[in-house]
Image (cartoon, coloured by chain):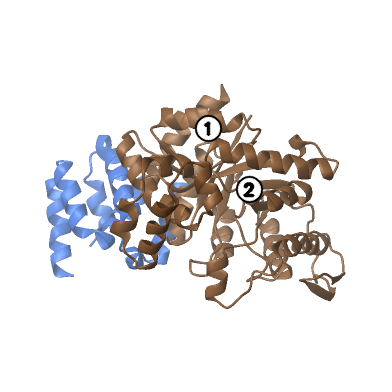
Amino acid sequence: MVKFGIEFVPREPYWKIIYYAIQAERGGFSNLWITDHFNDRNVYVTLTATAIYTQKITFGPGVTNPYLVNPVFTAQAIATLNELAPGRVVLGIGAGDKTTLESVGVEMQKPLTAIPEAVDIFRKITSGENVVYKGEVFKTAGAKFLFKPKGGIPVYVGAQGPKMLELAGKIGDGVLINASHPKDVEYAVNCVKEGVRQAGKKLPDVDVAAYTSFAVHEDLKKATKAAVRVVSSIVAGSPSVLLERHGIDVKKAEEIREALKANDWGRAFGAVTPEMIEAFSVCGTPDTCVQRIEQLLKSGISQFVVGSPIGPNVREAIDLVSKKIIPHFKK
Amino acid sequence: MDYRKLVETIPVAKRETVSNKLIDLILSSKNDEKMPSQLASTILHHWQNDILISESGLTALLEAAALLEPEKTIEAFTQLELAGLAEQIKEVATKT
């Protein structure tokens, strides 16, 4: 049976996120992901509050990156969280966002090397090992915790491109596929399957999640309006090959990119077309969302992540997912 | 203002509706910085235990709503036909 996850962005104060987290847990969500961007509130402080106020939901950063935060610090934070909420903590890790990293002068160095190295260091040090590591990107000269960590923390690798998806399938206990359209998710799952095959695993051994941009409301127009902001950013950041796969005019995408750079939100949002909404979000009434999730499930995902913006009113949207979407998949 | 005394005047039958309305006001407020951390903890503690419609839960919600969104809180109570409450909140809101 498919699991439902939910993503929160700690741009909101912790008390709003924790309110929604409790609501989501009560409403049948099994996973909670908190985004990690230096310009939002801190992911681990938010996750600590999550640990304290929830009882059973599984949670973790969705996703952190090894460039801005060294893997040993990530391991320390996750291991400590795992003491607060034993067995409920996972690590979500990916290469991060190039633009954000550049804004703090950090280079996204060799992501296809850096991610497996970071995961390796994470697993070793959270197993209590004294880690001497000579990687291409990361090196440790005898790193060991002075406390006894509870190991075995699942690692989810966030991925979008084919090589990273393959790698994620190979090394991850889970994969977070950054896509919303069945075509993209199917393509991604096939890449993951290749990695899984190379590692001698089977697909059900890996929790494969579609990490979507999601907006639900009983009124389709309101749901669509909520999705526009997020979709405009996705379109602006998408490579031409992805836009063309969905028949999206590359010039239109460029127009949105320019408008966003100029902070001209009206022009950027106004240029978002229904095709873009369709390609880069799961958006609509509960019924239309159910249909889209059913399509996504055919590609072999095991977790559906309700990502930002969730809906025009987050509280109402969580209720709608809990009462009208999740029950449909528990029948 | 003694918010507890105000809450005691809310008819039991209306408490769930009032609680829902106040939660919406608080969660959709853009005045996040006005929320005292202790009050946020109290609200979350009540939500965690699913007792936001208790008198103590409603008291915390009312205090938060009045701090973050005084005008909308007054309007909400007027719409909920709790004009007396709206008046008392208005009195305090105009003084602060």
What residue did someone put label 1 on?
A293
Q: Is residue B51 visible?
A: no
Label 1: state its secondary structure: helix
Would you name the residue on which mark 2 appears? Answer: A176
User: Which chain does the residue under circle 1 lie in?
Assistant: A
Colour that chain A carries in the picture? brown
Q: A122 or A239: nearer the eye?
A: A239
Q: Is residue A288 above or below residue B23?
A: above
Residue visible at 65% across and 61% down?
A95
Q: Disc 1 marks which amino acid?
A: Ile
Q: Which of marks 2 and 1 is nearer the N terminus?
A: 2
Q: Which chain is blue?
A: B
State yes or no: discs 2 and 1 in contact (Cβ < 8 Å): no
Could you tell me the amino acid type at mark 2? Leu
Residue A288 image offset from top left, x and y in percent: 43, 30
| In the depicted structure, whether residue B63 falls above or below residue A88 | below
Element type at mark 2: strand
Q: Where is residue A312 in the image (x, y as percent from the top left)?
A: 35, 46
Q: Please provide percent x and percent y for residue B56.
A: 36, 51
> In front: A49, or A186?
A186
Dot 2 and dot 1 within a common chain: yes
